[in-house]
Image (tube, rainbow, N blue to C red):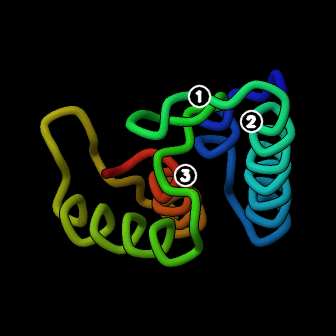
Amino acid sequence: MSLDLHTLADQVTDESSLIDFISALAGDREDELAKEAISPTSPFGPGANGWENGTIEAFLGAASAWAEGSKNGLPLYTPPQNPWTRMAHILHMGKLYE
């Protein structure tokens, strides 16, 4: 899948664009599962599309932990003013945050 989820998350500004982002995130996960079925990656690292959290529990836990840890910003992250964009960032980090 050739989506740049980071860019898509930054482009979320309203409910409709958040729904589009969630759909793209789900598609990215489905694409990773298909790739992994053909050629599995190491169980000790991210999947073919970079997913660190492969269960709903891990995904939601990572999203929640990152949201809590970043609510006042991080050295390389300033929370956006738009809450829709912030929600997209939180969901995106559910994929990546360990």
Distance between mark 2 and mark 1 Cα atoms: 7 Å
**Residue in the picture at 49% in, 56% down:** 53
Q: Is residue 81 above or below residue 95?
A: below
Q: Is residue 37 left or right of residue 73?
A: right
Horizontal and vertical percent for residue 47? Answer: 58, 35
- Mark 2 surroundings within 10 Å by alpha-carbon count, few (fewer than 14), some (14 through 19), many (20 or more): some
Please tell me the numbered disc located at residue 36: 2
Of circles 1 and 3, which is in front?
A: 1
Q: Earlier in the sequence, mark 2 or mark 1?
A: 2
Q: Residue at x 53, y 66 (%)?
A: 87
* Number of numbered labels in the structure image: 3
**Kind of residue indicated by mark 1:** Thr
Q: What kind of residue is marked 2?
A: Glu
Type of amino acid under label 3: His
Horizontally, is 83 left or right of 13 in the view?
Answer: left
Q: Secondary structure at mark 1?
A: loop
Among numbered discs 3 and 2, the one appearing first in the sequence: 2
In the rendered structure, the answer to whether residue 94 lies left or right of residue 44 reads right
Q: CA distance from mark 1 to mark 3?
A: 21 Å
Tell me the distance, in whole angstroms, between the alpha carbons under discs 3 and 2: 20 Å
**Regarding mark 2 in the picture, which secondary structure is present there?**
helix
- Give the residue displayed 13% in from the left and 36% down from the top: 75
**Residue hosting label 1:** 41
Q: Residues within 10 Å of mark 3 (few under 14, many from 20)?
A: many
Marks 2 and 1 in Cβ contact (< 8 Å):
yes
The residue tagged 3 is: 92
- Dot 1: within a 10 Å radius of its alpha carbon, few (fewer than 14), some, or many (20 or more) residues? few
* Label 3 with label 2: CB-CB less than 8 Å: no
Q: Quadrant of the N terminus?
A: top right
Contact check, label 1 and label 3, Cβ < 8 Å: no
